Image (cartoon, rainbow, N blue to C red):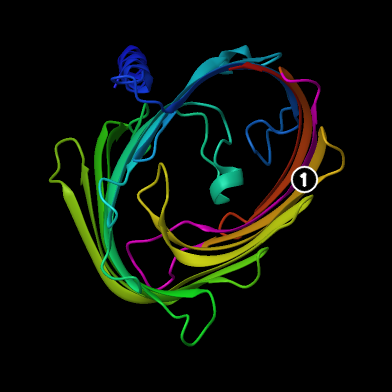
Amino acid sequence: MKRESIQRLFVAIVLLSFLAACPENGTAADHQLITSVALIHGYNDNIFFSNDDVQADNITTVAPKLDLLRHSERYTIRADGKLEFYRYEDNDELDDVDQWYNGSLTTTPTERWQLGADAHISDDNRPDRDVEETGLVLNNVQRKRINAGASTQYTVTEMMGAGMSLTFNRENFDDPETSDRKDYTAVLFLTRSLDAWLTRTTGRLNMSYSHYNFEREYERNSIQIADDYEVDYYGLTLGTESTLTERLNLTVNLGGRYTCSQQNLEVSYPYFPAQITDEDDENYGFVGNINFGYQGERYKCNLLLSHDLQPVSGENNTVNRTTARANGSYRFLERLSGNLYGQWYRNQNDPDDPTQSGIDTQTWNLGGGLRWTVNDYFDLAVSYVYTYLNDYEEHHSYHRNKALITLEAHHD
C-alpha cells in the first residue's frame, strides 16, 4: 500500500469518525476532537545499533497528531493519526516520515453482549525502531503494517461469561531480502467468578490458534532464492484475575503450546537444477504471564513476567521470548511527574528445531523521564534510555544511549 493510499484511508477514517461524533436526533453524547503537535529533539549515540560502525547523531522530529472520540451509553468510537517528520543532522539520507493510524469501536448492544473492533495502519522506517519493544533490532527498511481485529463477549450468567476474538496482521517490507509476514489468530475464552473460593477473583480459560506465514524472494549473485516459512500454533492457558485490594491487581495465566513449523528453501542456479530443502518440526513449550499492578493517589507501578513463542518482524523466524518489565511513575506536584522503567528480553531459537536459526540474544532497556504540564496547552518532557544487547550467536555486544526533550502543544 502506497503512502498516498494510507493517507486517503486515514482521511476516510477521520471523516467517518467525525460524522459519528455528531449528535443524532438531538441525543446527547460526549465527543471530542484533540489536535496536538510535538517538537522533539534527540541525541542518539548509536543510530544503527552497530558494533563496528558506531555513528552518533542529533535528530529533530515534528509530530502532528489528531485524536477523535465519541462516547455514549452504548458505544465508544476512537480514531487517531500521527505523522512523524524526522531529520538527522549528519545522516540526512535517513530523513523520512513515519505514519501511524488507529481506529476502534466498542459497543454493548444489549446488557449481555459486548462487541469490539479495531484497526491499525503504519508506515515506518526509523533505524533500531523495535529494540525497546521486542529486544531485537530491525534496521532502516521501510515497513508497511496493517492489523485488524474483532471481538465479542457474552455474559452467560452472573457468574460466567464467554467470548472470542479474531485478529489479522500483515507486514510488507521495501526490501526483497527482508521477510514479509501474514498472521491470523483466533482466541476462545471462558470466564467464571471464583468469589466463593477467592474473594474478588475471576478464573479464565484461553484457547488460541495462530498461523504465521513468512516469505521472501530475492536474487544474489545471479542466484534466485525463495524462502517460505509457516507455523501453526495451538495454545491453552488457565488463569485468574484478582483485585487483591482497591489498589492492587494480579493477573496470572499459565499453560502450554503445541507448534508445527515447516520451511521450504529453493535455490536456483544458472544452468543447474534448483536445490530444494524442506524442514519441518513439532514441539511443545511453556506459555505464561504474570502481571502485578498497583495504583495509588500519587504513585503507580506495574510488574510483568511473560514467556511465549513469538514471530520475528522482518525474518523467516520465530523465537522463544521471555520478558521481564518493571515500571513506575510518581506525581511530585500537581503539574510535575516522573517515571522509571527497566525491561529485559531473552530471545532464543529452539536449538532442536531445524526451521529456526540465528537468534540468541539478551537485551536490557533502562530509562526514565520527567513531564511538566506548563499550562492547559503545553507540556514539556525530558527522557533518557540506555540499551544493552548481547548477541550470543554473533559473539558481539551493543550499547546505545538516547536522550530526548519534547515540547508538546495541544488543543481540544
Q: Residue at x 21, y 40 (%)?
A: 269
Residue at (44, 60) in percent of width and height: 319
Image-based side of 326 in relation to 115, left or right: right
Q: Is residue 342 magenta?
A: no
Percent position (x, y) of residue 5? 30, 15
Pick the front one: 90 or 369: 369
Q: Is residue 141 left or right of residue 112?
A: right
In this rendering, the answer to whether 2 lies above or below 119 is: above
Question: Is residue 119 placed above or below 349 in the rendered structure?
Answer: above
Can you give x and y, in whole percent of width and height, for residue 208 in the image? 29, 65
Give the magenta range. Answer: 348-376
Quarter-of-image position of residue 168: top left
Q: Position of residue 43 (x, y in %)?
A: 76, 26
Residue located beneath label 1 in the image: 339
Q: Quadrant of residue 45?
A: top right
Q: Residue furthest front?
A: 26
Can you name the residue that lies furthest to the bottom here?
197
The reply, left or right, for residue 329 in relation to residue 11 is right
Residue type at mark 1: give it: Asn
User: Circle 1 — which element?
Assistant: strand
Residue 6 drawn at (x, y percent): 34, 19
| Quadrant into which the N terminus falls | top left
Q: In the image as oriented, which residue stretches furthest toward the right?
A: 332
Total tally of numbered discs in the picture: 1
Q: Residue at x 68, y 38 (%)?
A: 52
Q: Mark yes or no: residue 8 visible.
A: yes
The quadrant in which the C terminus is found is: top right
Asked if residue 365 is among those painted magenta in the image, a careful observer would answer yes
Q: Is residue 186 visible?
A: no
Q: Residues within 10 Å of mark 1 (few under 14, many from 20)?
A: some
Position of 282 compared to 239: left or right?
A: left
